[in-house]
Image (tube, rainbow, N blue to C red):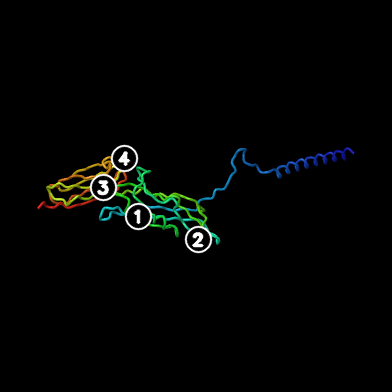
Amino acid sequence: MAKSGGLTAFRRGDLWWHMRIGVLLGTILCAAPAGPAEGAPASSAVPAKAIGGQFTAAFEGFTPEGLPKVRLKLQLSCRLTCPPSAPQLTYGVNGGADAFYVSAPKEKVGYISAGLVADVVKDGFSEVVTTSIPAGVNFTAIARSATCKCGNRTGEGGYIDLVTPAVAIPPWLMLAYPAKSGEQQMLLITARPRGEELIEVRLSGCGVDGNRTLTKSDYAGKTTVPWTITPTSEGVITAVAVLQPAGGSHTFKFVVASPK
């Protein structure tokens, strides 16, 4: 009887432990997942921007009249997949495009044709050559709020600003009139330095070897500064103008004739 009673006691204890473990497992499995801490903002998925692209600018030399030629290229890309209900993918630069001085980033320089922005609509690509950005400047151009969309779903692809790397356009040099030995001549230096930028000019040949440095204050109220020189012999004078510290340079050679 004692043996039977011991076995009965063991089974009762074993049953109690199994029931206890079952209750604990049920509690764990049925517990709700932990939520955010009190006062924490609810999470929300922010879709990645589908719009991407590149904006570049390059100085391509001067026209015979001394106007800088700047090539601007805007290439947009889009990761949207348009559905049958809105099948047409289009692009835009809703904020327009402008150029600014690197050393005076709030000051606009020149003018960028509205055609650059308008032409991206169909395939995201546009290219123009402008002569409206002046000589002797260091600038960047920015295309604001570039975007893409399917059909009329404005803003669907998100918005980004695209900025070109800095581009240095060297100063423009020219003579006021034909040079003759023994006669006074003016070399005209066209530039628009800003901030701490400098215009450095070097002359060599025909007895007028020398250097000159111009600052923003030298161009106050004007875009061209004259340098008066007097060649002492016939030959060729070489003038080199550099926009510092950007480094854009322009070399100009001119003939000094006989005064006769």
Could you tell which of marks 4 and 2 lies nearer the N-terminus? 2
Q: Which mark is residue 88?
A: 2
Labels 4 & 1 near each other (Cβ < 8 A): no
Q: CA distance from mark 1 to mark 3?
A: 21 Å
Which of these two is toward me, 205 or 51?
51
Locate residue 6: give its quadrant. top right
Residue position for label 1: 71
Labels 3 & 2 near each other (Cβ < 8 A): no
Number of other residues with Cα within 10 Å of mark 4, as a class: few under 14, some 14 to 19, many 20 or more: few
Mark 2 or 1: in front is: 2
Which of these two is toward me, 118 or 146?
118
Q: CA distance from mark 4 to mark 2?
A: 49 Å
Q: CA distance from mark 3 to mark 4?
A: 17 Å
Labels 1 & 3 near each other (Cβ < 8 A): no
Could you tell which of marks 3 and 4 lies nearer the N-terminus? 3
Q: CA distance from mark 4 to mark 1?
A: 26 Å
Residue position for label 3: 190
Rendered residue at 75%/42% (across/down): 23
Q: Secondary structure at mark 4?
A: loop
Residue position for label 4: 196
